[in-house]
Amino acid sequence: MSTHRSRTADPLPDVPSGSTMGMWGMWLTVGVLLAGLAGLGAAALYLHSGQPAWPPDGVPAPASARAVAGVLLAAVALTVLTVARRWLISGPRTAVAPLLLVAMGASIASVWSLVTDLLDAPFRWDEHAYTSVYWVLTGSAAMFVGVATLMLGAVLVQRLTGVLDARRMLELEVTLTYLRFAVLATVVLIGLVHLLPDPGGGL
């Protein structure tokens, strides 16, 4: 992704519909990441199913407020970026760059919430299968949103330098596609961390 040159996001002119190579590349990337997300989820469910209690006896249940805040902030970033794309397509608006800045700020805040949630966890990552799952899944969610933050930064620089407009917006389209995946992944991963029932019958 270049911050100095934005490619067109128009479909191919000689076919009824089509997408750029950049979008095809992002869809393939998302497909690979979805397979990885499924693997993380399957591993968490497998480890959960073999435990007598979740969290295990002697391991305090972590608070969920920061993790939930991380999910909500990622969703805010996605919503704001979607609005920015619509405004960019509808015509020249000076508020597109501030919207991109807000989206990036929400994404940064999401990563901060997820990372601080891990740093304040009342256990180490290697104490138990539960604690390992907690660290790996929450850390993966932070990583996915963190990549989106870097992409948002590149799109913001493009807009500020004048290489992003209604016809040259491939990087914005790619970032929006990836951010949709990142929000989905965050919801799934944080849900697996905090919402799995106690195997012994409790919640």
Image (cartoon, rainbow, N blue to C red):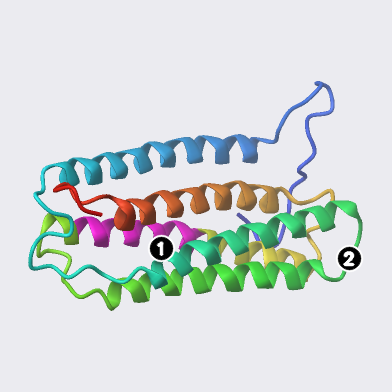
At mark 2, the secondary structure is loop
Q: Amino acid at mark 1?
A: Ala
Q: Is residue 144 left or right of residue 179?
A: left
Q: Is residue 42 left or right of residue 172?
A: left
At mark 1, the secondary structure is helix
Residue on which disc 1 sits: 142
Work out whether mark 1 precedes mark 2 in sequence or the reverse, and give the earlier one: 2
Disc 1 from disc 2: Cα separation: 32 Å
Q: Nearer the viewer, residue 185 or 14?
A: 185
Q: Residues within 10 Å of mark 1 (few under 14, many from 20)?
A: many
Q: Indicate yes or no whether the magenta region holds residue 142.
A: yes
State whether residue 200 is above or below residue 161: above
From the top left corner, tell me how far across and down residue 72 is, in percent: 53, 64
Q: Amino acid at mark 2?
A: Arg
| Residue closest to the far front | 202
Region rendered in magenta: 132-147
Q: Residues within 10 Å of mark 2 (few under 14, many from 20)?
A: few
State whether residue 71 is above or below residue 182: below
